Image: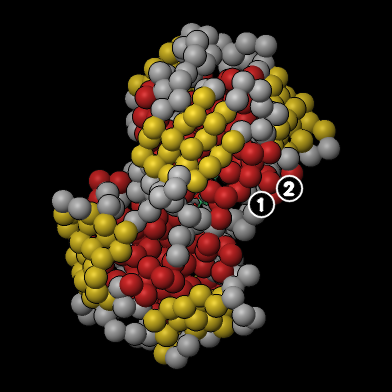
Amino acid sequence: MGHYVVRPGPRLEGSVPIGGAKNSVLKLMAATLLAEGTHRLRNVPHIADVEIMCDLLVSMGVDVKRDPDGAGLSITRFSDVTPEAPYELVERMRASIVVLGPLLGAFGQARVSMPGGDDFGSRPIDLHLQGLEALGAEFSFAHGTIEARAAELLGTRVLLEFPSVGATENLLMAAVLAKGTTVIDNAAREPEIADLAAFLNRMGARVVGAGTSTIEVEGVHELSPVEHEVIPDRVEAATFLAAVGIAGGEILLEGARSDHMDMLLQKLGEMGLRTSPTGSGLWASSSGRLSSVDVSTLPYPGVATDYKPVLVAMLSLADGVGIVTENLFADRFRYVAELVRMGADIRIQGHHAVVRGVERLSGAPVKAPDIRAGAALVLAGLGAEGETVVTDSEHVERGYEDFAGKLRSIGADVTLSRTPA
Ligand code: EPU
């Protein structure tokens, strides 16, 4: 437990390294279950969710070690694993459900605790289960646990009702060792899916079309361990872009990939933030007050729902009125009440937020409700008079490595304190 103490400071200046993508590395770690031997992942961020996925793999009998330089993980999967994801771990991290596909693919069985709802509301997994059933898996449910079995997985066509990231990943990881060809239609197109497919292909899988709406997987008999570098985290990059939008200044996001964030960069450009890809990352600069825009969240390549809290923080201080429409997670506006405590003028109507920009927010004690919203509250503090204290930092630490330290390195006045607030 900790809290961030934030004070408005000077314009931001300098460069900040963007770490490996949380939402990629967790799935790559799950994919190591598909092949016996030692896998190496590079550019693995030091964040709590990675630690939880390490604990989950270790609980299954997999050996996980941080490389001596701290930048990567060596993951050794032995011939035997306990194909089980217990409640204590799934409850700590919903994304644990992505072990279901690889366990079924590699071992034909899995016991996975049902993930519950979270701060975004109910989070169903029906699409994961329907897709895996189409491949031949059978499920039974008792005492909060899914028992999954598949004597043999057989390739087939699966049409996803919605391009769910997690369902696409579970299906992809189950299909690589299935017999025959699987086609996933209306697949999610996020860069993290393409990264997973690149990893699987390097292991010997035959996946084409990842990153588009149709993914075709020709099953193979066996996969082998390889080394792979995780793509940069586009949500972390977006968070630092929002920081410079709020505080002003000029920064370089080392390693960030602008081609993974096209739609967001277009929106931020409309708001008045200037960005330009460089040989080593993404340059961004902002001077003066930003202008309001309307934004709708959509599956990739649309503006990601994960960017929304930091966009709302920016709009809270922008000139004009912006309407933000959430199309993925109906309840993902819970942090708005905290921004309002800081003087933001935001009204929620169903899945829309009407954000009327104010000149200055006012520092206040607020509570981080989830990873992205917590980061957004810290950023709001950069544009607030006086001191903002964001409690429950553990949410932010799930997805951001040394958030306060990285912000400080570009001139922001942010500290993480472990003493009671
Ligand atoms: N959905 C269903 N049924 C399913 C699966 C999803 O109805 O079986 C619905 C969800 O309720 C939601 C929509 O489909 O309305 C999208 O969910 P999706 O499955 O795409 O999301 P996810 O895989 O659970 C990942 C990220 C989230 C990110 C979403 C959307 C990880 C670990 N999580 O979740 O990231 O918001 O995709 O892009 O990859 C975060 O990093 O803070 C985070 C929450």
Q: Position of residue 95 (x, y in %)?
A: 58, 43
**Mark 1 C-beta to ligand 1 under 8 Å:** no
The residue shown at (52%, 16%) is: 177
Give the secondary structure at mark 1.
Answer: helix
Question: Among all residues in the image, which is located at the extreme bottom?
Answer: 386
- Determine which quarter of the picture holds residue 108: top right
Q: In the rendered image of this protein, does residue 352 appear above or below residue 418?
A: above
Pointer 2 and pointer 1: residues touching (CB < 8 Å)? Answer: yes
Q: In the rendered image of this protein, does residue 254 appear above or below residue 142?
A: below
Q: In the rendered image of this protein, does residue 367 appear above or below residue 116?
A: below
Disc 1 marks which amino acid? Arg
- Determine which quarter of the picture holds residue 325: bottom left
Disc 2 marks which amino acid? Glu
Q: Position of residue 48 (x, y in %)?
A: 56, 55
The residue shown at (38%, 35%) is: 228
Give the secondary structure at mark 2.
Answer: helix
- Crowd tier of the residue under label 1, counting other residues whose Cα lies within 10 Å: few below 14, some 14–19, many 20 or above: some
Quarter holding the C terminus is bottom right
User: Viewer-proximal residue, 251 or 57?
Assistant: 57
Quarter holding the N terminus is bottom right
Q: Determine which residue is flagged by label 2.
A: 88
**Distance (Cα) linking label 2 and label 1:** 6 Å
Is residue 136 in sight in this rendering? yes
52 sits to left or right of 281: right
User: Viewer-proximal residue, 75 or 366?
Assistant: 75
- Crowd tier of the residue under label 2, counting other residues whose Cα lies within 10 Å: few below 14, some 14–19, many 20 or above: few
Residue 92's disc is 1
Q: Position of residue 420 (x, y in %)?
A: 64, 81
